Image (spheres, helix red, strand yellow):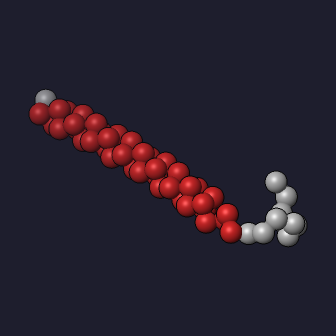
Amino acid sequence: MAGTLRKLGGERSNRTLLLLALLFAVVAAVLVFVAVNQGGGDEEEGEGRIL
């Protein structure tokens, strides 16, 4: 019985870690996207960029 409870607690812990990792990955992707978009504003128009 105690082993089953421990196993269920471990699965819940693994699920929480997975959700935290996914959340961290999404936040990191958004930060990189924002940084790339703000850093790309120095280019002059007419250099062949397609928008």
Q: Quadrant of residue 50?
A: bottom right
Q: Which residue appears farthest toward the top when viewing the image?
A: 1
**Residue at x 50% of width, y 55% of height:** 31
Q: Is residue 31 left or right of residue 17?
A: right
**Residue at x 44% of width, y 47% of height:** 22
Q: Is residue 47 left or right of residue 24?
A: right
Q: Position of residue 25 (x, y in %)?
A: 47, 52
Question: In the displayed structure, would residue 40 be above or below residue 51?
Answer: below
Q: Position of residue 42 (x, y in %)?
A: 68, 69
Whether residue 29 is visible here, answered yes or no, is no
Whether residue 14 is visible here, answered yes or no, is yes
Q: Nearer the viewer, residue 39 or 25?
A: 39
**Residue at x 24% of width, y 34% of height:** 8
Quarter of the image with the N terminus is top left
Q: Nearer the viewer, residue 39 or 33?
A: 39
Q: Quadrant of residue 16?
A: top left
Q: Is residue 38 left or right of residue 50?
A: left
Q: Is residue 40 left or right of residue 13?
A: right
**Residue at x 67% of width, y 63% of height:** 41
Q: Position of residue 35 (x, y in %)?
A: 55, 61
Q: Nearer the viewer, residue 21 or 44?
A: 44
Q: Which residue appears farthest toward the left when viewing the image?
A: 2
Q: Position of residue 4 (x, y in %)?
A: 19, 33
